[in-house]
Image (cartoon, rainbow, N blue to C red):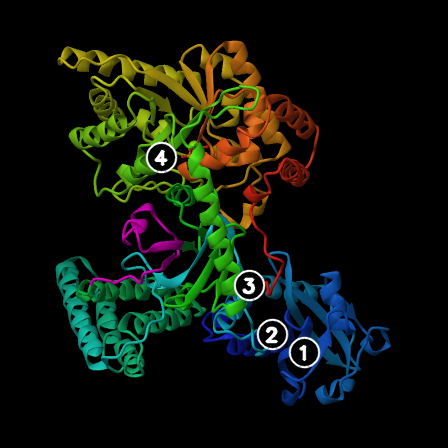
Amino acid sequence: MLNTLRSIVQEVNGAADLDEALKIIVERVQEAMGTEVCSVYLLDTSMNRYVLMATMGLNQDAVGQVSLGYSEGLVGLVGVREEPINLEHAQKHERYRYFPETGEERFESFLGVPIIHHKKVLGVIVVQQATNRRRFDEGEEAFLVTVSAQLAGVIAHTEATKYIAGITATGAQAKDVSFKGVAGAPGVAIGQSVVIFPTADLDSVPDRDVEDIPKEIKEFEVAIQSVRKDIEQVGQRLAAQLRPEEQALFDVYLGMLDDNALAGEVVRLISEGKSSQSALRKVIKDYVGHFEMMSDAYLRERAVDIKDLGSRILGYLQESEKTVRSFPENTILVSDELTATMLGEVPADKLKGLVSIKGSGSSHVAILARAMGIPTVMGLIDVPLSQLDDRELIVDGYNGDLFTSPSQDLRSYYEDIVQEDRELDASLEKIKDLPCETTDGHRVLSWVNTGLMADVLRSLDQGAEGVGLYRTEVPFMINERFPSEQEQMICYREQLEAFAPRMVTMRTLDIGGDKALTYFPITEENPFLGWRGIRVTLDHPEIFLVQMRAMLKASEGLDNLRIMLPMVSNVNEVEEALHLIYREYHEVRAEGYDVSMPQVGVMVEVPAAVYQVKELAERVDFLSVGSNDLTQYLLAVDRNNPRVASLYHSFHPAVLQALNRIAIDAKEAGVQLSICGELAGDPAGAVLLMAMGYDALSMNASNLLKVKSVIRGIDMAWARALLDKVLLLDSPYIVRSTLDLALKNAGFNRYLRPSRASGDQNQ
Ligand code: PEP
Ligand code: MG
């Protein structure tokens, strides 16, 4: 059974489009289950009807013609109940509906299973049998449920391809197609998409057409020659160590590069106008699918070799791609997984919006985008990246929606929002040099989080009173090796000088999780529970010590450095780190630098630290809550995984209780308490944190003036009353709506994110 299932899924995965995928499904399921009929009905959301999309056993003419209302017939019943319905005498059921055009009256036994993807019913798969047949047995039902669950993702993906082209799954015209992702950075961007992809990653090569076909073919042939040469050389080098049958494998690869095999197919697609890279992706994907379907395990394994061959050819093609990419004025950068480096590839004045298929709103790249003020949508997991290049897109970073080929009406709607945002920003300018204090004089420090040099200028422009978090890993991430002590020192000095005499809190290198260094890869099963932050740097004192020296030297004469330790889960980590910091401090002074010992603090970002505030406070000068990680660890929701993004609630009652407890314990311990997670930049979050007693709020520069404007418009009693009220609530949704309502009633409606009345929500 497993083999049958695997081969169906593989075959469907390799289908060129939705129609072909559905055809394969009905044919193969009918065959595997030995039934007379197998059909797939898909729900067309624009009509709210189930349309017969493919069948084996019913009249083919009925395909695309027969449709049922949302809750009509047995198909509708399966959809509404979201569970299988298995009937021996379907015609006796009160919901049975008869369509003469399907020739259905001959069939009695009915088994319908919903096709559900991410909680959404996409359609129903049905098998039927003639009168003399018994009820489908339990095993058959389980098989169909398994097929449906496995294929739902593939169907969603192929459906999305159609939607991008402006047609619904059932072929009707789709208007203002939107895809639901996760809000990454607020704001709206309207522009032209450019897909950017890591080199030698075949899967993310977009579909592109070319004009100069002969040139494209020539480049492809040169790439093939280079790969051929590489393989021959490797073969010769290994000749002595390989058995003849292993040696023969190299001949197989060389054979594939022949005109009458893989290479020939690529050239054929190029001749039809495809770019060499797109054509290569398509052909390799077909080959890989073909091999993966083989029942022989050895041959199945060869799929890996084909992928390798594909990457090698791609590598040469990309090397020969000499033209520097030009970016349109309103570039919306799209990628499978955006990285900090990619953001830097587009000139800043042209980069208007970002789209990342992977990741979610709490991913580090989203945080970076927020700091840069670039509207971003993340986690569009079912959107086929290859179809997204060179399209007009609207990025709604408030609600996490992406629109392809928008209508004039929709464009005007969003242009108005862009204009309103601009006006709001301009109106806030006047408070940038005023203190962040309530109407009754309670003062909180308004700090910023920085990473790139560009953040510094933005932050100063917004009147930041200091830096509560400088993410030192950012300069590490955009390098090709660990930066030297001197390089680090220059970078840190820039930050310290720019803000002096205001304090700059530098966090020691916090890599791991979703922050990777290309030159120091960390591959592990559960990266967020693994080798991260202080765990890495304490294991590599040579990296930690160089960073400490660079920070200390950079602070000479300025004395505005504070050092902060990330991911602390044990007091001994603090002690070890302090020991190293003191050691470096004395050494740097002995070398003649006139530096003072900086304040050292700990981030409270794992649940263990919440319960050890007192013990941590005894050892350091300040505590700063990393609510981004604290939320992920308290709720057991990976901050980078879009599948569970809807469970990541910054206002979850458990998170609020933890934050409150930290504030109480920190006050008792007499230590300064700040917060540098994204919650501080949410106006409602900031009000609650201030009411809890946090001394400083550190946030993205983009949010600073909004937060300040709200705090300057309320008094402490109002904030405390609101806090008392929400601390009694038990649901994150009710907390959020209570806060929104309170802010709205207090006149801060314009800081609440605009939410569009639901249109065609296709994903
Ligand atoms: C946090 O975890 O809240 C934090 C500020 O650090 P980062 O987002 O860089 O992990
Ligand atoms: Mg963190």
Label located before the other in sequence (1 or 2):
2
Q: Residues within 10 Å of mark 2 (few under 14, many from 20)?
A: many
Assess whether residue 328 is covered by the magenta stretch: yes
Residue 351 lies, in percent from the top left, at 34, 54
- Residues tagged 2 and 4 counted as in contact (Cβ below 8 A): no
- Residue 2's label in the rendered image is 3
Name which residue lies at 35% across and 35% down.
461
Location of mark 4 (residue): 459
- Residue 35's label in the rendered image is 1
Amino acid marked by disc 3 = Leu
Mark in front: 1 vs 4: 4
Location of mark 2 (residue): 29
- Residues tagged 3 and 4 counted as in contact (Cβ below 8 A): no
Residue 329 lies, in percent from the top left, at 32, 61
Residue 221 appearing in the image: yes
Q: In what element is the residue under mark 3?
A: helix
Amino acid marked by disc 4 = Ser
Instruction: Check the image and report above or below for 309 versus 627.
Output: below
Label located before the other in sequence (1 or 3):
3
Q: Nearer the viewer, residue 337 or 228?
A: 337
- Residue 468's label in the rendered image is none
Label located before the other in sequence (3 or 2):
3
